[in-house]
Amino acid sequence: MGVNLYNSEGYLDPTAYEALKNIEKEKKLNPNRKIVFVCSPFAGDIEGNIARAKRYGRFAVTEKAIPFAPHLLFPQFLNEEDPEERELGIQMGLVLLSKCEELWVFGSRVSSGMALEIEKAKKLKMPIRYFNIHCKEVGGMK
């Protein structure tokens, strides 16, 4: 996979670097597990959406995947209420999406951030799987 301390535009990006390093380490320990990007709502019912995102991550683990849920990571140090920081978090998530093998979309509602992630996955020709809030697959891979 190759981990770089700088992003594709040449800027120092230690957060993405650390996340990618951890993903790469886990992938080496578990080479048969695919890395999946967990795509689900964050804004609105933040407390409920965080609880659901954690459940979706746990579901991915039970499916022998390595989940990556940036909306659980980036709000730890970025302010979702600040439009610039929210945009930064979305952009960092899109960078990391390109390092994943599949996009797993959860829920019946697609937020604006999720729409960007789905569009990016389509451009990357990445497999996309859709699940309801109960982690039951709906619609299969696209």
Image: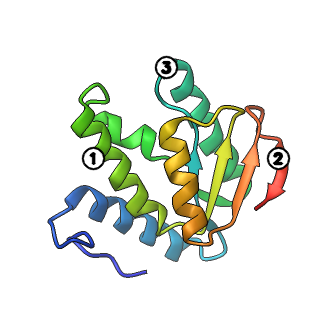
The answer to whether residue 78 shows anywhere in this view is no
The answer to whether residue 115 shows anywhere in this view is yes
Percent coordinates x, y for residue 72 in the rendering: 44, 38
Residue at x-position 83% and y-position 41%: 136
Residue 5: give its label: none
Residue at x-position 55% and y-position 71%: 124
Q: Which residue is mark 1?
A: 88
Ranked by sequence position, the earlier of labels 1 and 3 is: 3
Residue at x-position 47% and y-position 68%: 98
Percent coordinates x, y for residue 23 in the rendering: 44, 65
Please indicate whether residue 16 sits to the left or right of residue 39 in the image: left
Q: Which residue is mark 3?
A: 44
Measure the alpha-carbon separation of dots 1 and 3. Answer: 19 Å
Point out the image quarter for the N terminus: bottom left
Measure the alpha-carbon separation of dots 2 and 3. Answer: 24 Å
Element marked by disc 2: strand
Q: Amino acid at mark 3?
A: Gly
Q: Amino acid at mark 1?
A: Leu
Q: Nearer the viewer, mark 2 or mark 3?
A: 3
Residue at x-position 84% and y-position 50%: 139
Tell me the crowding category of disc 3: few under 14, some 14 to 19, or many 20 or more residues within 10 angstroms, Cα based: few
Please indicate whether residue 10 sits to the left or right of residue 86 in the image: left
Residue 137: give its label: 2
